[in-house]
Image (spheres, coloured by chain):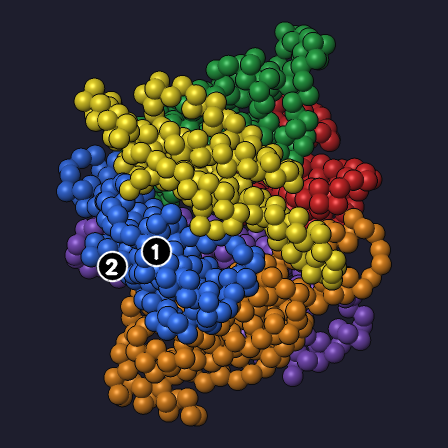
Chain colours: A purple, B orange, C blue, D red, E yellow, F green
Amino acid sequence: MFYKLLAALDRKVKFPEAQAHCDIPCGIYDPIVAQINALTVVRMLDLMADLDATTGDKLAYHNSMSRYIAVKEEHAEKAKHEIRVIFGDYIKAPHVEKYPELPTLVHKIMMAGSKVRQSTDRAAAVEFVELINKFAQIFWETKGISTKRAKAPYKPELELVYPNL
Amino acid sequence: MFYKLLAALDRKVKFPEAQAHCDIPCGIYDPIVAQINALTVVRMLDLMADLDATTGDKLAYHNSMSRYIAVKEEHAEKAKHEIRVIFGDYIKAPHVEKYPELPTLVHKIMMAGSKVRQSTDRAAAVEFVELINKFAQIFWETKGISTKRAKAPYKPELELVYPNL
Amino acid sequence: MFYKLLAALDRKVKFPEAQAHCDIPCGIYDPIVAQINALTVVRMLDLMADLDATTGDKLAYHNSMSRYIAVKEEHAEKAKHEIRVIFGDYIKAPHVEKYPELPTLVHKIMMAGSKVRQSTDRAAAVEFVELINKFAQIFWETKGISTKRAKAPYKPELELVYPNL
Amino acid sequence: MFYKLLAALDRKVKFPEAQAHCDIPCGIYDPIVAQINALTVVRMLDLMADLDATTGDKLAYHNSMSRYIAVKEEHAEKAKHEIRVIFGDYIKAPHVEKYPELPTLVHKIMMAGSKVRQSTDRAAAVEFVELINKFAQIFWETKGISTKRAKAPYKPELELVYPNL
Amino acid sequence: MFYKLLAALDRKVKFPEAQAHCDIPCGIYDPIVAQINALTVVRMLDLMADLDATTGDKLAYHNSMSRYIAVKEEHAEKAKHEIRVIFGDYIKAPHVEKYPELPTLVHKIMMAGSKVRQSTDRAAAVEFVELINKFAQIFWETKGISTKRAKAPYKPELELVYPNL
Amino acid sequence: MFYKLLAALDRKVKFPEAQAHCDIPCGIYDPIVAQINALTVVRMLDLMADLDATTGDKLAYHNSMSRYIAVKEEHAEKAKHEIRVIFGDYIKAPHVEKYPELPTLVHKIMMAGSKVRQSTDRAAAVEFVELINKFAQIFWETKGISTKRAKAPYKPELELVYPNL
């Protein structure tokens, strides 16, 4: 309700059509891709911890561990890349005026994305998801679309921010 | 309602834990990535048609046209890749037994993905989106999650299949 | 002999010019690339087993093991990708009518490709090679070119299906 | 001189060892890669304008134009990626405290990088180079290394910011 | 016959086990991948010339032309990459002693690969294929495997050098 | 001084405008990218050795070790790729006439690049840097630009060859 009101208001007060000037003008941006990638980082850490707790074949251990780390690495990178694309191609000066925390939030996402690559700290990865959730919420707000939080339909079943469609 | 019932039933009748054997076991699969990519193909065709109808600077025309075609190409490829990953890593023999149309549907998606790269036919691109929607619907069914159709919150605002979360 | 006959027959009975509609029309497809990639997976498993049996410098062990696993991963992925391209761009409905096992065979290849990434089971990798050999044989048949089996000229020297040129 | 003083001062006043926490701790960051990539964007625009002014073979025209646009696209992307990596992996909160303009500068670089992909406007590309020069200057300052401006030793011979080594 | 003799001789005279020191020791190298890629360059030029000779829809023209050029670009690059890998990972000093023309041949291949990207000259692309054929012939000789020339089983049906297996 | 003289001489004696025929004609080549990448290989080996000497959490050990090895791998590859591009696109026959050691030097760089991927030998990585320095020196000479050696402004602070700008 509130969001639709906000959106209506935005349109009324001539919030400039910033989205008309994105990379390919009027591209399709959706933070869900970054959110799924960040969630995958948490999942990999869970699998790494599980694997580490088992005893078993050394070769199988190395094979799985190497793959989990590589997948963690790749998905953290993709999450950062997706956010950078939306930040650089969709977010314009008027958005930043309205949400002045955006550049710092993006910096925090980038630093968090680096941290989850370097470390095996689950809390850092959950924080990474939450920072991107925060970005997603602002993103949908700029489009006048309200959001909800819901458990992702796959492990580790953390809550993600989804648009109400 | 029906889907939850189905899911409950599935669990009862020991639908094998197929998802326990995916690429990275218990990975995170979500057809939305393929759906967004397919939608982007339609969007690019619309932008190409718009551009073609304008008169203007030849250099700017080539710059934009080349970029639209490249983006179309890349996103059609990504959509195909995402479907292949879910098909190869998540879909197992028991799924195919239950949904025997799956291998043929995947083949159709692959052919449609090739066609939208070759041609500038909008109807073919819409068909590509619909085939992937169909795949998405089956995918969520295998997880016991019901779906809805809703307009995507970005142009060209075609309907996508979304899970009810 | 038989293949040339078959090919002649095909042409006679107006086997539709399916290959006229491939991704870039009349592209160059050759399953040998997938076959070499699958063979590399077996080779990496052999090197991993050899390395695991040696005692030596821990750093060198990790360096080599990580690299073998990464190369295995990459080549399994490439093999799957190559098959998907031929399946999506070259194989058309008339081929599937004639070889109805094709979509299921491709599914098996995709699943086998996932398995060899997850596990260190040599038999699974040999099976991966054989499934792709089977695909190669059908592929060359569709072109009216007979095939032979011959040892690959590099370790692990498994037999591959080659066209008679 | 001034920079060395600054650096000495920084160390004295316990400027936190921020660089000890970069992506791979103590990685090697150098904005020259982004600078070269941005310069290439300007070069491509010059080549595109030259080509457009010639009359000649249509096929050769398309071949060259397509390639220039693709190279422009790729290098703009690489420049943005490099800046994002330094921003996310090297720049830490204490840097931002000292140079509060950094997050906004990075946002401007990202927007400029999008603009040079979309348009064929040479002034925008020169601006892109200058924004990255500005980033380079701050970067070297954080390391206590003074800089100079010098013409790049390749066309279009714009000035780049170089560290005094 | 001659090649097998040569190979036998080589082994006898203790031709050093150069291949024991390749990138992943004892990797699987096969110039056929480079050869197929080079052939694709010629094919694209043929398709570009055909397209250019037709009259038709401008949008379809741009779509196809852009894609042919991009495929030409990508395959020329892949061919160069493959040759570089074999040259850097498999070819060792003793090979160069025996075939002193190798470094220059590789340089010629690299230059030819650049030329076919820049131009639309079919003769240059055929020359690119022939230079890689020459490399393939030497490669198989170093392994003691004789070769033959045969028409490739796909358009443009140029002759490639194949090992006798 | 000497270099400028040489350059002047070159121009006088009609040193052919070889750089007019590079991949994208008159592209921007700079060996610094390869040099930074090679330096990174040494850095990773240092980090690997440090990590190996510590005792600590097994999971963190694997996470860091895997990442260092992957970064080493990637940067060795990039260094080789950059040299290959300059060698194939910029270096022409007249350069080789003047610097006949070039093709062999490139071969040595490629072999060294393979070795540093396979092994954990720091001396081999330092040698890799030096071979690329040698290439850089010749490169700048061909452009009539003198060079100096200076410590790189990041660990491991080896000397690199820089142009005097």
Around disc 2, counting alpha carbons within 10 Å, would you say few (fewer than 14), some (14 to 19), or many (20 or more)?
some
The residue at which mark 2 appears reads as C127
Q: Is residue C104 above or below residue D25?
A: below
Image quadrant in which you'd find residue D49: top right
Marker disc for residue C146: 1
Q: Is residue C63 left or right of residue E75?
A: left
Image quadrant in which you'd find residue D4: top right
Question: Cβ–Cβ below 8 Å for labels 2 and 1?
Answer: no
Q: Disc 2: which chain?
A: C
Q: Is residue A158 above or below residue E147?
A: below
Q: Position of residue F4 (x, y in %)?
A: 67, 11
Whole-number angstrom distance, CA of label 2 to CA of label 1:
23 Å
Q: Residue at x 42, y 24 (%)?
A: E102
2 and 1 marks on the same chain: yes
- Residue nearest the viewer, comparing B32 with B58: B58
- Residue nearest the viewer, comparing B64 with D90: B64
> Residue D98: in sight, yes or no?
no
Q: Disc 1: which chain?
A: C
Around disc 1, counting alpha carbons within 10 Å, would you say few (fewer than 14), some (14 to 19), or many (20 or more)?
many
- Residue nearest the viewer, comparing E65 with A69: E65
Q: Residue at x 49, y 42 (%)?
A: E158
Q: Position of residue A120 (x, y in %)?
A: 35, 54
Q: Position of residue D14 (x, y in %)?
A: 51, 36
Q: Residue at x 80, y 64 (%)?
A: B53
> Residue E69: in sight, yes or no?
yes
